[in-house]
Amino acid sequence: PVLLGLNVLGVAGATASLLELVSALGRAPTGMWSRRLQVATLVCAPITAVLPQMTGAILASCAILLVSSMTRAIQAARLDRDSRVVARAFLVLAVCLLADLVKELFSLPIPDNLPLAGFTVLFLAAARSLNDRFERDHEASRHDVLTGLRNRRSFLEAWEEALQRSRRSAKPLSLVLCDLDHFKRINDTLGHAGGDAALRAVAQAIRRSLRAQDVV
């Protein structure tokens, strides 16, 4: 009974975690009813060690959470590559679960532990996609959207590192400040779109004229 309770708790934890991963990737908060079902499933799962007759109800709740996660993943697949990767992994899991069901019904020579393999593929895909999303968001938060150059926060970090290297090596450090003359005239005559184009052109020209280790 204890092993049964732990097994059901593991399934409940896996399905609840999947819903959170998919919600994070899709940038959509978990709904109130899904949240309540998550909590109820996780709280009631250990009780199956004492009341095995509740196992079917808990596994049915896990199935609902899994279907909800799959639906969210498929809906989010239209938005970006990360969500499409997770949606494909869900399809792998669905095939593994279906094959395991066919094996149980018809006693076919299908390998064991297919559901475990499917869940492993899904968790690895979701974790990788979430990590890639975090890295891109982190990188985007350090650069100016218009010009692609470092923003103030990123520049100050790079400046502190360069200053420390200069002090350790006793080598000089150069800091160049530049200003665009008559920039207001560009905005007044060409509009803000023209001003944006000028800023992008200047940023690109500066980048092309510097070494790889220089920071703009």
Image: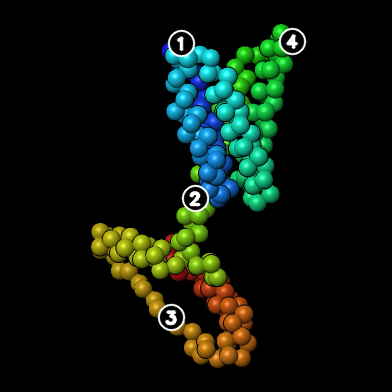
The image quarter containing residue 33 is top right
Asked if 162 appears above or below 73 in the picture, the reply is: below
Residue under the image location 65 percent in, 51 percent down: 79
Say what secondary structure mark 3 lies in.
Answer: loop
Q: In the image, what residue type sits under mark 2? A: Glu
Q: Which three-letter amino acid code belongs to the residue tagged 1?
A: Pro
Work out whether 55 lies above or below 157. Answer: above
Q: Residue at x 62, y 20 (%)?
A: 114
First in residue order: circle 4 vs circle 1:
1
Using the rendered view, name the quadrant where residue 195 is placed: bottom right
For marks 3 and 2, the one nearer the N-term is 2
Is disc 2 placed on a helix, strand or loop? helix
* Residue at numbered disc 2: 135
Compared to residue 69, the image places residue 196 above or below, namely below
Q: What element carries label 4?
A: helix
Q: What residue is rendered at 52% in x and 89% in y?
A: 184
Q: Does label 2 or label 1 sit earlier along the sequence?
A: 1
Residue that numbered label 3 is attached to: 178
Q: What element carries label 1?
A: loop
Of circles 2 and 1, the one toward us is 1
